[in-house]
Image: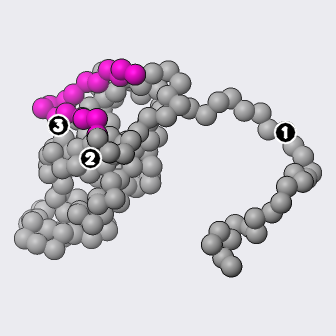
Amino acid sequence: MRIRIKYFEDATKLKKIEKGNWIDVYANRDVFVRVGERAMIPLGFALELPQGWEAHLAPRSSTFKTWGIIQTNSVGVVDDTFIGDNDQWHMPVYCLQGKHNEESIKAIDGMEAEGTWIKKGDKIGQFRIMEVMPEIEFEEVDFFGNAERGGFGSTGVR
């Protein structure tokens, strides 16, 4: 499958990875995020997803450990209508803890602020594409007639 991509402002080029089936994404500018605040990190590209496909954007497993940030919406869903020339992808983040070094403090409005720097080129997230859910209809019933698993939260309980 070939997907057209447009890059913004000397963005880091996306690459197909050797292991796994997610594609890494990179910050496209330096952003300081204060502890307890959120930011939209530009990723430097737009994709023309094929009709009937969507992308799921998620943090990498090392994102919180490295920068102390989480993605605010857990997983971002980009549908096949977000395909305009200026529809640059962003990753919405929230800073829970600053990096504990000299770069974790920034003077903002004359006051020191604790937070984290995300630098242009930092690998902060990943995405994959998948087909959208098919059209479905709900059929109301009073009983399924299937074996029960034990209720919500029962997996792994003995």
Q: Is label 1 in a helix, a strand or a loop?
A: loop
Name the residue type under label 3. Answer: Thr
Q: Quadrant of residue 36?
A: bottom left
Residue that badge 3 annotates: 12
Name the residue type under label 2. Answer: Ile
Identity of the residue drawn at 35% across and 53% down: 59
- Front in this rendered view, residue 9 or 5: 5
- Front in this rendered view, residue 23 or 112: 23
Q: CA distance from mark 3 to mark 1?
A: 48 Å
14 in magenta = yes
Quadrant placement of the C terminus: bottom right
Q: Quadrant of residue 146?
A: bottom right
Residue that badge 1 annotates: 139
Q: Most extreme residue toward the right, as rendered?
A: 142
Residue that badge 2 annotates: 41
* Residue 80, percent from left and from top: 47, 26
Magenta stretch in the rendered image: 1-17
Looking at the image, is 6 positioned above or below residue 92?
Answer: above
Q: Is residue 55 left or right of residue 67?
A: right
Q: Quadrant of residue 26?
A: top left
Name the residue type under label 1. Answer: Glu
Decide if residue 40 is in sight here: no
Q: Residues within 10 Å of mark 3 (few under 14, many from 20)?
A: some
Identity of the residue drawn at 76% across and 69% down: 150
Mark 2 and mark 1 lie on one chain; the one further toward the N terminus is 2
Mark 2 and mark 3 lie on one chain; the one further toward the N terminus is 3
* Residue 84, percent from left and from top: 36, 22
* Residue 58, percent from left and from top: 39, 49
Quadrant placement of the N terminus: top left
Identity of the residue drawn at 41% across and 25% down: 49
Q: Residues within 10 Å of mark 1 (few under 14, many from 20)?
A: few
* Residue 53, percent from left and from top: 49, 28
